[in-house]
Image: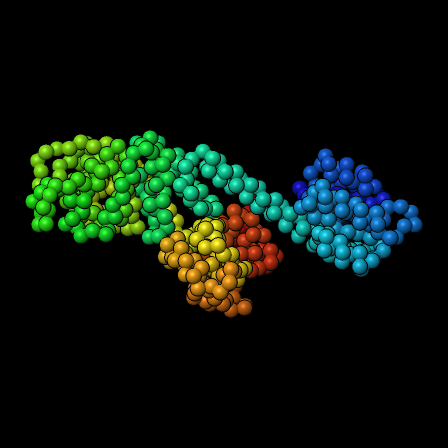
Amino acid sequence: MPTVLIIDDNAAVAIALDVLFSLHDIASLRAGSPEEGLAILGREPVDLVIQDMNFTADTTSGEEGVALFREIRRRHPDLPVILLTAWTHLDAAVELIKAGAADYLSKPWNDERLLTTVTNLIELGQANRALNQRLQRERKAKRELEQNFDLRGLVWQDPATERVLTLACQVARADVPVLITGPNGTGKERIAEIIQANSQVADGPFVVLNCGALPSELIEAELFGADAGAYTGASKAREGKFEAADGGTLFLDEIGNLPLAGQMKLLRVLETGRFERLGSNRERQVKVRVISATNADLGAMIRAGSFREDLFYRLNVIELRLPPLAARPGDILPLALSFLRGKTLHPSAEAALQAHTWPGNVRELKNVMARASLLAQGDVIKAPDLGLPVAVAQVADAEPDREAIVQALARAGGVVAQASAELGLSRQALYRRMERLGIARPA
């Protein structure tokens, strides 16, 4: 049950407010002086304060209330305070509202207005506290990850990225294959580098092969090497990526492009650590940690017969799913700032970056920022400098549908105030839509 502290030297006022709040499931504490009120705040959890502005008989200046308010604000900067007085001084009210007072009501008050104000402020305060607690947890988790692991200078802020990093660091020292899935341009290779940097073979080589960048007939030679004359143009023997990665990590990007013959040989290497170069009968032995990545649907490829199911399960001992950039909105601005060349972002540019859907993910963002840094006039990048397509404005009376509301609530961790801000609605408007669409209020 939320709790309101009433600081007023008039006992009748405090009792009337106490009765009013008790009828609406709001607990109240009473203090007859500023000193008593500050003492209660020091020992009791309070959601909101309602304070008088005058405490000495025949005093109407409001100076005592101003002093009390400023002391509450100093000790409890986030606590909402409603000012209540029989003597309305408009100038003083404006100044205190600017200083952070939540509202200024005169006696006798309107019960309905007071209850609405108190309810909204308590709800907002609870939402803000929940948000702050969540942000504190996220900052703590981020600090711990950065302190305990080598993240290779990765720039990130979003909880979705944190979850991937936490799992990557957790499995880094285990000698098992890892499969990283996600769209192109999301940073799968960087995650592989982080796994290598925190593994038991961190001092070994980190070798990369993009299976989608080579003709299928050359991929086996790249993986396993080839003796002279093994194929047309092979004038001398060459070692493959497995030999180069011996004692370290081999990162196979776009593993879905590996032809079936190469898949069979890769499976054997994963199981035994042995292979032969193309054109050779001599078996070679290596110790390599394999990390693979793909943007393809390997399950669909298995059903189509283009990817071996046994290889999939061998590669997929641990799977890390890296979401697209649009699903990690907290990463967008930190990444954008990291790509800048000594320039800053105008608020209009920040809004445009957050509104864009980023089909090319981090790679697209990096290119956009590089172009804006070169072409922008001055040291501040504005929205037009980004060259992003203008988002289609929503019709003024358009309402978010059920799916949009559910997703916004999920992203906000159930904090209605945050979800309503994202949707461009007031909290009450969002509550009405939730009720109409049958969406339960978060617990």
Question: Where, quadrant-wise, is the C terminus in this rendering?
Answer: top right
Query: In which quadrant is the N terminus drawn?
Result: top right
Q: Quadrant of residue 203 in the image?
A: top left
As displayed, is residue 198 above or below residue 440?
above
At x 20%, y 36%, the residue is 243
Q: Quadrant of residue 196?
A: top left
The coloring applied to the image is rainbow
Depth check: 111 or 148 in front? 148
Drawn side of residue 369 relative to residue 196, left or right: right
Answer whether residue 77 is visible to the viewer in this image: yes
Residue 400 visible in the shown view? no
Q: Residue at x 80, y 60 (%)?
A: 90
Relative height, residue 393 to residue 328 (above, below): below
Task: Tell me residue 274's x, y (percent).
Answer: 17, 33
Above or below: residue 420 compared with residue 159: below
Q: Is residue 247 left or right of residue 78?
A: left
Residue 411 in the image: state x and y as whole percent: 49, 50
**64 vs 284, nearest the viewer:** 284
Residue at 72% x, 55% y is 98
Q: Nearer the viewer, residue 151 or 395?
A: 151
Q: Nearer the viewer, residue 436 or 31?
A: 31
What residue is rendered at 81% in x and 42% in y? 34
Horizontal and vertical percent position of residue 388: 43, 64
